[in-house]
């Protein structure tokens, strides 16, 4: 059997197959509307009963009944021979697979068994228009503000603007498409020295008639200060004024995200399952997954395994050290930290300063061995600073 890729004008033919769940219908409506990227393969272009959708980035969707061996063989070949290699070549190795019905699970596990996919839970919310939500002006300090994302902002040199580029690039066909058919807001930090920088964003995604989704992120330094609530409040206020009902999709274990959603006025309408993982560096990805869930011992063991396999050794040994430190496993933390420093082949000032001040390693600060590491990092910082200053002088002399 050969899978057939549909043309955009024919996408509406698969809509009914996505109707088994609210989050899947929400996704396909945005793809059909032309506001979210997507490529669709089917078994029969005239009367499809099985569908594979890829958004071109990290999200994959399987719907219809997986009861046809020939289709499954063809789909596996498409994934292994074309889709996954293309995703890796475009630095999109992380994947999330949503599906309906549950019978697709055996196909996913068998096809990606070497990629260590893990089954996780997600929750889908919808905004209650009768909710009372706070104004961002009541939440933020005077040196922070919520600003609408517009062309002027995207064309500016403001700090961290590339983080907004990355988000829009993953969810829209183009920046012009986003500006014309979507909207979003960001947190701007206006420092006393005049420097301004983006410290978080809340962008619309998956737009279709009368509804949209929300992508939201606050930089770690400013998390747990109400900034996400401030951006989300401004977002829903603007959406409601345009007659659009926002939706919120989150990992069920992401309590911070769900807390913000409920605070702003979202109500859960559905729980569902998804598989997630990475096509490469799977062990390291699992380490990150369990670290984010604050299951630090499990995270540490996955990071160690990734490093032992030769995957991003500095990063994985360092993350293992941080994870062990967060469990107060002092000797394991130092063992991995020393290994990380051995594999730090191209140190930078940012990396060195990050290690010196990383709060994950706080339990090591009073240990004698930590002082040896600090001394090493101090020497490294001096060399890098001198090298940077020398380079600056040379560049100035060439003006």
Image (tube, grey):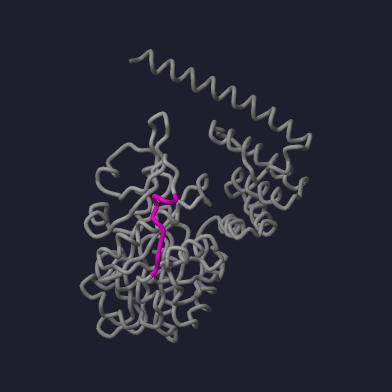
Asked if 92 appears above or below 356 in the picture, the reply is below
Which corner quadrant holds the C terminus? top left
Which residue is painted at 54% across and 74% down in the image?
A: 110
Q: Main secondary structure of the magenta part?
A: loop
Q: Estimate the x, y position of residue 123 in percent, counting from the top left.
A: 48, 71
Does the magenta segment cover residue 134? yes
Q: Estimate the x, y position of residue 320 in percent, counting from the top left.
A: 66, 49
Does the magenta segment cover residue 297? no
Q: Nearer the viewer, residue 39 or 71?
A: 39
Q: Estimate the x, y position of residue 241 in percent, counting from the top left.
A: 26, 63
Which corner quadrant holds the N terminus? bottom left
Asked if 140 appears above or below 106 in the picture, the reply is above
* Magenta stretch bounds: 131-139
Which residue is painted at 73% across and 35% down in the image?
A: 370
Q: Nearer the viewer, residue 149 or 65?
A: 149
Asked if 99 appears above or below 68 in the picture, the reply is above
Q: Is residue 275 left or right of residue 380?
A: left
- Counting labels gives 0
Q: Nearer the viewer, residue 70 or 260?
A: 260
Which residue is painted at 44% across and 15% down in the image?
A: 393
Q: Estimate the x, y position of residue 294 in percent, counting from the top left.
A: 63, 58
Asked if 223 appears above or below 79 in the picture, the reply is above
Q: Is residue 348 left or right of residue 241?
A: right
* Quarter holding residue 208: bottom left
């Amino acid at each position: 059997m050969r899978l057939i890729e549909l043309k955009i004008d024919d996408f509406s033919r698969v809509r009914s197959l996505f109707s088994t769940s609210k989050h899947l219908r929400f996704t396909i409506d945005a793809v059909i509307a032309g506001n979210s990227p997507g490529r669709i393969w089917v078994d029969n272009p005239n009367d499809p009963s099985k569908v594979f959708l890829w958004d071109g980035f990290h999200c994959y969707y399987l719907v219809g009944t997986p009861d046809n061996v020939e289709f499954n063989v063809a789909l596996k070949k498409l994934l292994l021979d074309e889709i996954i290699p293309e995703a890796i070549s475009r630095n999109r190795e992380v994947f999330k697979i949503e599906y309906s019905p549950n019978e697709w699970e055996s196909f996913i596990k068998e096809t990606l068994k070497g990629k260590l996919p893990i089954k996780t839970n997600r929750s889908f919310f919808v905004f209650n228009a009768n909710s009372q939500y706070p104004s961002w002006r009541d939440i933020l300090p005077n040196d922070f503000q919520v600003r609408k994302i517009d062309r002027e902002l995207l064309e500016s040199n403001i700090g961290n603007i590339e983080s907004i580029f990355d988000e829009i690039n993953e969810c829209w066909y183009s920046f012009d498409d986003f500006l014309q058919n979507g909207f979003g807001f960001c947190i701007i930090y206006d420092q006393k020295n005049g420097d301004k920088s983006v410290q978080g964003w809340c962008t619309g995604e998956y737009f279709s008639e009368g509804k949209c989704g929300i992508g939201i992120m606050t930089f770690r330094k400013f998390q747990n200060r109400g900034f996400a609530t401030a951006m989300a409040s401004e977002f829903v206020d603007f959406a409601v004024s345009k007659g659009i009902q926002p939706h919120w999709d989150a990992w069920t274990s992401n309590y911070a995200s769900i807390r913000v959603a409920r605070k702003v006025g979202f109500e859960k309408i559905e729980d569902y399952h998804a598989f997630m993982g990475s096509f490469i560096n799977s062990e390291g990805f699992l380490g990150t997954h369990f670290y984010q869930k604050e299951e630090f011992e499990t995270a540490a063991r996955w990071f160690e395994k990734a490093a032992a396999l030769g995957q991003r050794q500095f990063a994985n040994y360092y993350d293992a050290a941080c994870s062990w430190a967060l469990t107060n496993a002092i000797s394991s933390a130092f063992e991995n930290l020393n290994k990380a420093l051995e594999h730090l082949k191209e140190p930078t000032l940012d990396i060195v300063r990050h290690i010196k001040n990383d709060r994950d390693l706080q339990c090591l600060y009073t240990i004698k061995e930590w002082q040896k590491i600090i001394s090493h990092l101090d020497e490294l910082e001096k060399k890098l600073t001198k090298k940077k200053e020398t380079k600056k002088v040379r560049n100035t002399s060439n003006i």
